[in-house]
Image (spheres, rainbow, N blue to C red):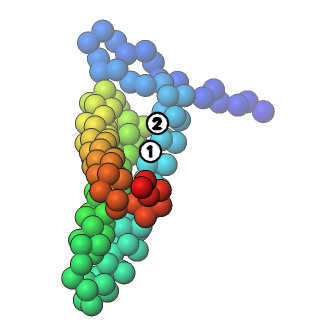
Amino acid sequence: MDQAAPMVKPAPKQGDEFEFSDSHNLVFDGVARWMKIVGIIEIVLGVIYAIPAVLNLAVLNTPPVVIAALHIVVVGLMGAWTIKAGGSVRAIVTTEGDDVRHLMEAMEKLKKLFFLQGLVFLILIALTVVSFFTGGLSAAPKIP
């Protein structure tokens, strides 16, 4: 029985757009798949976080509700940006002639995502330090 040889992309000609190999595309495909899964999970978590926040907002008008609302927005943005970046990575696999452009689009979207995550971490660190020095951490030992 004659088996067909796997299709291999020819090397790009001088001046042609670079195309990743089939083995590279397998990696990109796996990354794109997981980016979509993680993005969907982040959006679902944002919706789950929204339910008690909305219920509390109807009863209470407290700062924790505002913080929860901000958390929902951040998680939702992270999910949406992860899915969009995953779409650009997926386009590397599913299109021909634009691999570098799609890769750069994915990098731009990931840059926004990581900027948002870094900003959130820096704010959390600052709030933790302020809370520690103002006695806001109930677990912190009291120094006489």
Point out the residue furthest to the top here.
Answer: 14
- Residue 32 numbered tag: 1
Point out the residue furthest to the right here.
Answer: 1
Secondary structure, mark 1, is: helix
Say if 128 sits above or below 67 in the image: above
State if disc 2 and disc 1 touch (CB < 8 Å): yes
What is the x, y in percent for residue 61? 21, 82
**Frontmost residue, 23 versus 51:** 51
Disc 2 marks a residue whose amino acid type is Phe
Q: Residue at x 63, y 26 (%)?
A: 5
Gap between marks 1 and 2 measured at Cα: 6 Å
Give neighbour class at mark 2: few <14, some 14-19, many 20+ (Cα, 10 Å): many
- Residue 144 numbered tag: none
Q: Quadrant of residue 48?
A: bottom left
**Frontmost residue, 3 versus 117:** 117
What is the x, y in percent for residue 47? 36, 72
Asked whether the viewer can see residue 132, the reply is: yes
Q: Residue at x 36, y 53 (%)?
A: 132
Q: Residue at x 47, y 56 (%)?
A: 141
Disc 1 marks a residue whose amino acid type is Ala
- Residue 28 numbered tag: 2
Q: Quadrant of the C terminus?
A: bottom left
What is the x, y in percent for residue 45? 41, 67
Q: Residue at x 43, y 25 (%)?
A: 20
Say if 44 sits above or below 61 in the image: above
